[in-house]
Amino acid sequence: MEWDQILGFLGLLLGAFGGLFGLWWGRNKAAENRGLDERYSSIMTKSFSSAWKITLLSMYILFALLLFGVELAAVPLLGIILLIHLGGWTFSTFYYNFKF
């Protein structure tokens, strides 16, 4: 393994652990402030659903681009889909927080 591969793998691990720690920390702080209620549950359910709908739409668009001859490798394609999914989840969570 070369250094860039080792650093990339460490970045993946640190990113995953950082995300899990942020999720744990945020839920603990929300529980302290009585934030884990029915409203939270409803918002998270709707934002998960919206994120998957956005991801499905983006997959269809990327498949259409492949049919039109755009060359996309597997790793960048998966990265694009992951970023779209996480971004859709984030924006739909903000949307439903302001809507309800």
Image (spheres, rainbow, N blue to C red):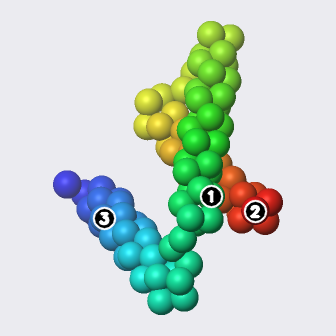
Q: Quadrant for the C terminus, please.
A: bottom right
In the picture, measured across the screen, residue 100 lies left or right of residue 26, that is right
Q: Quadrant of residue 69?
A: top right
Q: Residues within 10 Å of mark 2 (few under 14, many from 20)?
A: few
Report the residue at 51% width, 45% height from top. Answer: 82
Numbered label attached to residue 43: 1
Q: Are marks 1 and 2 in contact (CB under 8 Å)?
A: yes
> Is 5 above or below relative to 30?
above
- Nearer the viewer's eye, disc 3 or disc 1? 1
Furthest-left residue in this view: 1
Q: Which residue is mark 3?
A: 13
| Label 3 Cα crowd, 10 Å radius (few <14 / some 14-19 / many 20+) | few
What's under tag 2, amino acid-wise? Phe
Determine whether label 3 and label 2 are within 8 Å by CB: no
Q: Residue at 62% across / 34% down in the picture?
A: 53
In terms of image quadrants, where is residue 65? Answer: top right
**How many residues crowd mark 1 within 10 Å: few (<14), some (14–19), many (20+)?**
some
**Could you say which is closer to the camera, residue 68 or residue 43?**
43
The image shows residue 92 at horizontal and vertical percentages of 69, 53
